[in-house]
Structure formats: structure tokens, C-alpha cells
Image: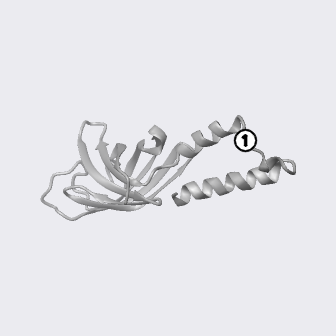
Amino acid sequence: MSFQTFRFSACLMFFALAVLPPGAAAQKPQKALPAVQQAAQQILQDGIYKVTLSTPDGHNGVGIVVISGGAVNGGDPAYTYQGRVDAEGDKLNAVIDVVRYDPKEVSIFGPLDNFQLHFTGTLQQDGKAFNASGEATPDPKKIRLNLSGERLRELR
């Protein structure tokens, strides 16, 4: 169980104990269970993700990231990625530090060497995929990016 799932479950348990009449918490839930399960499934799942980046002018790039407990680590042939992603409900926010390690590789980021990506988006497929948009900062051209992520594997 991930920390986010545990935190969500603990909050639900606290809520149930705080607002239900005495003895009601011991009863089996009836119609609320499917809604609780559906909400819990929208937590971003830890795993290895393929990420596809695209710019409005048609440039595309692909990388791999590992998401574990909100930490993001990964890269592509020219850059390393490290940062955090936070998800609440079906919404996500991410701030990723991007550092070039191979200046010979051509990239959708152009000449940028060290910058941050700021993304907001939504979770898909029970937290195993996402779509987001954002921009690179500081960047005088204000590169806008679309990002999609698809979980390839669970973490061991």
C-alpha cells in the first residue's frame, strides 16, 4: 500500500468515526463502498512510466520516469529529470528539474541546459496514466508542453 493510499484510507476512517452515530462504524458499509473504491483508485500509482512530450509547433520527445511516493526520477537521451508530483482526486501537479547531460543530442527543449518544468493535469485509467500541460521556466521563449504518461510496470 502506498503512503498516499494509506493517508487516504486513514482520512476516510477518521471521517467515518467522526460523523457516524455510535456503533455505525462497526456495521458493513452498503452503498458508500463503490464510491470509496472509485476515489481510491484515482491515486497516482507508483511505477515505471513512458512519458511523451509535445510542443504546440509539432516537436515530440519521449522519456522514462520512475514515480515512487510522489518522487519522480528519469530521463531521455539528452536530459535527466528529477522532481515531485502531487495528486489529489483526479488532479495532479508536478515540478520537475531538468538537467542536460549530453549537449550533442537534439531535443525539443532546444538550447536549454538547466530548467524546471511545471505541469498540471488529470489522472486517467485508475491512476495508471495521466495527461498534463505546462511550461519550462526560466525560458525566454516560454516553451509550452503537453505531456502524457502511461505506466509500463509496477515497482518491485
Residue 29 image offset from top left, x and y in percent: 72, 41
Which residue is nearer to you in this view: 140 or 92? 92
Residue 86 placement, left or right of 146 = right
The residue that label 1 is drawn on is 29
Q: Which colour scheme is used?
A: one colour
Residue 156 image-quadrant placement? bottom left
Which residue is nearer to you in this view: 149 or 139? 149
Residue 39 image offset from top left, x and y in percent: 59, 42
Q: Which residue is drawn at 26% across and 58% down?
A: 112
Residue 30 placement, left or right of 35 = right
Q: Is mark 1 on a helix, strand or loop?
A: loop
Pointer 1 local density, CA inside 10 Å: few below 14, some 14–19, many at least 20: few
Q: Which residue is drawn at 19% across and 56% down?
A: 77
Up/down of 115 relative to 119, above or below: below
Up/down of 114 relative to 90, above or below: below
Which residue is nearer to you in this view: 119 or 40? 40
Q: What residue type is labelled 1?
A: Pro
Residue 129 image-quadrant placement? top left
Residue 21 image offset from top left, x and y in percent: 87, 48
Up/down of 75 relative to 126, above or below: below
